[in-house]
């Protein structure tokens, strides 16, 4: 081999070296023997090379030919579920189930090898494609992304306030390392509660999202990349509660880096990742939102860094498909919204949100939009794309039509007739007018509205939930008119939703007998505390995104100014109590990481509003016009979309 290489022509020798450097061997990672923590000594934890470019841009508007789109909508068009992976690409299933650490061939350090003239044109084409790919933003293209990147650089050079400097010091201090590399941030660094840490010393997927965005906007992407890949490996973990295992695509709620003896030795130690899928959580509830947040963060990482090659890896594509396979599976439900149990999202305790809570539906819609951009198009994915399109179409109509309330809608519900049995019933969910709470009649402004918290047969939860409404704006689940109405309501009811500390997680709180029955007399969720009407500063970054998207940045600036005056003095608490958010929460941890990160992300977005376009989605008009049910051809049953006075047309 050495003699052959030394006697080869210079061009062939350079080409051989280049190919040699490009080639990587895919080594299998050790299987997880009954919940054995993942060790950093496994090949899966090895360093990842930076990919030169992505081969295919999922967000390209020319991605689908008309005939292909027609095929997507034509196959099993009455269903919004996705076929099992075993019926599609068996290679993807085999690689994921066996936990193979498969990596694509990459060019590592290509500049070190001289490029011959006859290959220069090809390299120039690659570079041009990379520059073109930078122009993509949320399904479209903008011409000022260079200005956006320049703004990020300016943001780093801008003189920071003392509050911001303190926040960055605290955020850096919260970083967790695994095998010498940053992998996430702990939930809280409260030294005063060291003996009552519970699980606040772990890395939570939902908690890390604002931290990840803060690092990305600052230009530090390594920690986010490591987080995405390592949590993806944990997805294939063996998960069992009382001899029952949930779906394969479930993402953990959190994980912890532990140091354990190496092979029983007391002298040598190794770091391992110990995930929690809900089997150790209070109430033993699986985190439905973890996988949805992971998909949303994966898209944001690609948009901000331009590292689209990460999305195209076989293991990442498989991870996306497994999450969607869980969400799009056929079931007994008649609605396109996800059916979940209580405590399966940010509100992780019993608070009466079981069923179809708005927060899960908004994140679900956003994850579907993000997945549709990132999924690599091939024969094995066309059924999945078809299922995504069908579900997006049905879900957007369902939420906009049935979850939205304003003064006009409440008056309509007030006059509902019940016990209607027909295909064209107006009161489809048999809602009793007596359910309209007395507080809502006086609280609802003349101009404005919001999405209710939950909808089930004979039940509407009229509470205002901030995260679900904010993310409905960010993901364009809400129409422009509805999004404007939500912000109008917040401005009109500023003292109730923002008060002395932004922002209420929900309004109003459950009190008296209602609190006793719905929460089970939960001592942590007492009225106007914690998840029961508490004020959570971490919601600032989502509120800021929504405001910037709708051109209402002044509302976000007001809220950030309120928080900036108190947070450093109060030591960055997790949440605040009382109706106006005047007291630090009675069980609130101090130096809560997502409080710190939410504040920093909100500040950076306000200073560079163009960056918000990377994290939001615009209205998809083609999606709204599509309908997969084909009921218009049936004389007996009418399509609800055609019969209803949809918010889409208002």
Image (spheres, grey):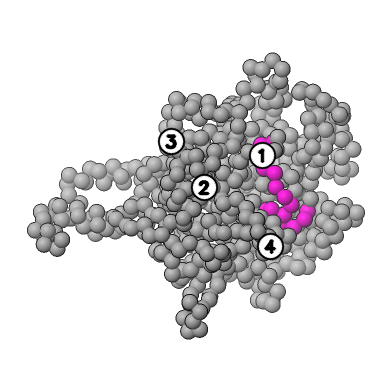
Callout 2: SS: helix
How far apart, in angstroms, are the residues tagged by discs 1 and 3? Answer: 25 Å
Q: Which residues are magenta?
A: 335-351
* Mark 2 burial class by Cα count in 10 Å: few <14, some 14-19, many 20+: many
User: Looking at the picture, does residue 163 appear above or below residue 515?
Assistant: below
Question: Which residue corresponds to the image point at 61% horizontal and 62% vertical from the top-left?
Answer: 276
Residue at label 3? 379
How far apart, in angstroms, are the residues tagged by discs 1 and 2? Answer: 20 Å
**Cβ–Cβ under 8 Å for marks 2 and 3:** no
How far apart, in angstroms, are the residues tagged by discs 2 and 4? Answer: 24 Å
Residue at label 4? 281
**Cβ–Cβ under 8 Å for marks 1 and 4:** no
Question: Which residue corresponds to the image point at 53% horizontal and 67% vertical from the top-left?
Answer: 37
* Mark 1 burial class by Cα count in 10 Å: few <14, some 14-19, many 20+: few
- On screen, residue 526 versus residue 387, left or right, reads right
Residue at label 2? 320
* Mark 4 burial class by Cα count in 10 Å: few <14, some 14-19, many 20+: some
Residue 396 location in percent, x, y? 64, 35
Residue 414 location in percent, x, y? 87, 32
Residue 350 belongs to magenta span = yes
Query: Which of pointers 1 and 3 indicates the residue nearer the eye?
Result: 1
Q: Which mark is residue 331?
A: 1
Instruction: Compare marks 1 and 3 and give the one earlier in the sequence.
Output: 1
Residue 572 location in percent, x, y? 67, 67
Instruction: Compare marks 1 and 2 and give the one earlier in the sequence.
Output: 2
Instruction: Compare marks 2 and 3 and give the one earlier in the sequence.
Output: 2
- On screen, residue 22 versus residue 160, left or right, reads left
């Amino acid at each position: 081999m050495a003699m052959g290489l030394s006697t080869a022509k210079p061009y062939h020798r350079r080409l051989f070296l280049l190919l040699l450097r490009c080639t990587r061997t895919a080594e299998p990672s050790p299987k997880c023997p009954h919940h054995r923590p993942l060790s950093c000594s496994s090949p899966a934890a090895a360093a990842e090379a930076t990919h030169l470019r992505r081969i295919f841009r999922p967000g390209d508007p020319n991605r689908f030919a008309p005939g292909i789109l027609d095929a997507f909508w034509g196959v099993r068009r009455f269903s919004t579920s996705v076929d099992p992976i075993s019926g599609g690409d068996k290679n993807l299933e085999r690689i994921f189930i066996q936990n193979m650490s498969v990596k694509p061939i990459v060019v590592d350090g290509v500049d070190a090898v001289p490029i011959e003239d006859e290959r220069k044109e090809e390299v120039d084409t690659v570079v041009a494609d990379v520059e073109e790919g930078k122009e993509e933003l949320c399904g479209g293209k903008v011409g000022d992304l260079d200005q956006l990147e320049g703004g990020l650089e300016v943001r780093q050079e801008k003189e920071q306030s003392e509050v911001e400097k303190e926040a960055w010091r605290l955020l850096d201090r919260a970083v967790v390392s695994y095998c010498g590399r940053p992998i996430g941030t702990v939930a809280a660094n409260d030294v005063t509660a060291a003996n009552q840490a519970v699980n606040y010393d772990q890395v939570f997927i939902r908690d890390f999202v604002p931290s990840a965005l803060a690092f990305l906007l600052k230009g530090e992407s390594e920690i986010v990349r490591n987080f995405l890949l390592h949590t993806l490996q944990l997805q294939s973990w063996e998960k069992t509660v009382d001899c029952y295992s949930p779906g394969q695509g479930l993402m953990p709620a959190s994980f912890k880096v532990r140091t354990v003896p190496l092979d029983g030795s007391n002298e040598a130690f190794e770091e391992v990742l110990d995930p929690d899928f809900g089997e150790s959580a209070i109430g033993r509830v699986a985190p439905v939102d973890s996988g949805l947040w992971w998909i949303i963060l994966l898209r944001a990482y690609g948009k901000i860094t331009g590292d689209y090659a990460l999305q195209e890896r076989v293991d990442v594509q498989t991870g996306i498909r497994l999450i969607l396979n869980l969400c799009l599976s056929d079931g007994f439900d008649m609605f396109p919204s996800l059916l979940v149990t209580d405590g399966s999202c940010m509100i992780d305790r019993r608070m009466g949100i079981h069923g179809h809570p708005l927060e899960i539906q908004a994140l679900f819609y956003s994850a579907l939009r993000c997945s549709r951009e990132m999924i690599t198009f091939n024969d094995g994915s066309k059924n999945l794309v078809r299922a995504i399109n069908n579900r997006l179409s049905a879900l957007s109509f369902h939420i906009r039509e049935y979850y939205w309330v304003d003064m006009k809608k409440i008056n309509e519900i007030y006059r509902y007739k019940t016990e209607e049995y027909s295909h064209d019933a107006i009161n489809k969910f048999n809602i009793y007018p007596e359910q309209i709470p007395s507080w809502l009649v006086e609280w609802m402004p003349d101009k404005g509205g919001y999405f209710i918290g939950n909808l089930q047969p004979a039940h509407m939860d009229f509470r205002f939930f901030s995260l679900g409404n904010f993310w409905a704006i960010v993901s364009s689940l809400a129409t422009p008119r509805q999004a404007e109405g939500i912000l109008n309501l917040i401005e009109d009811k500023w003292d109730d939703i923002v008060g002395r500390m932004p922002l209420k997680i929900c309004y109003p709180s459950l009190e008296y007998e209602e609190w006793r029955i719905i929460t089970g007399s939960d001592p942590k969720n007492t009225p106007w505390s914690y998840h029961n009407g508490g004020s959570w500063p971490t919601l600032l970054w989502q509120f800021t995104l929504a405001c910037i998207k709708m051109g209402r940045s002044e509302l976000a600036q007001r809220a950030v100014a309120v928080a900036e005056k108190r947070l450093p003095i109060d030591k960055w608490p997790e949440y605040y109590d009382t109706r106006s958010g005047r007291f630090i929460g009675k069980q609130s941890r101090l130096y809560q990481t997502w409080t710190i990160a939410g504040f920093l992300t909100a500040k950076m977005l306000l200073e560079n509003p163009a960056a918000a376009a990377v994290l939001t989605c615009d209205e998809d008009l083609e999606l709204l016009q599509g309908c997969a049910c084909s009921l218009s051809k049936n004389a007996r049953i009418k399509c609800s979309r055609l019969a209803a006075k949809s918010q889409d047309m208002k």
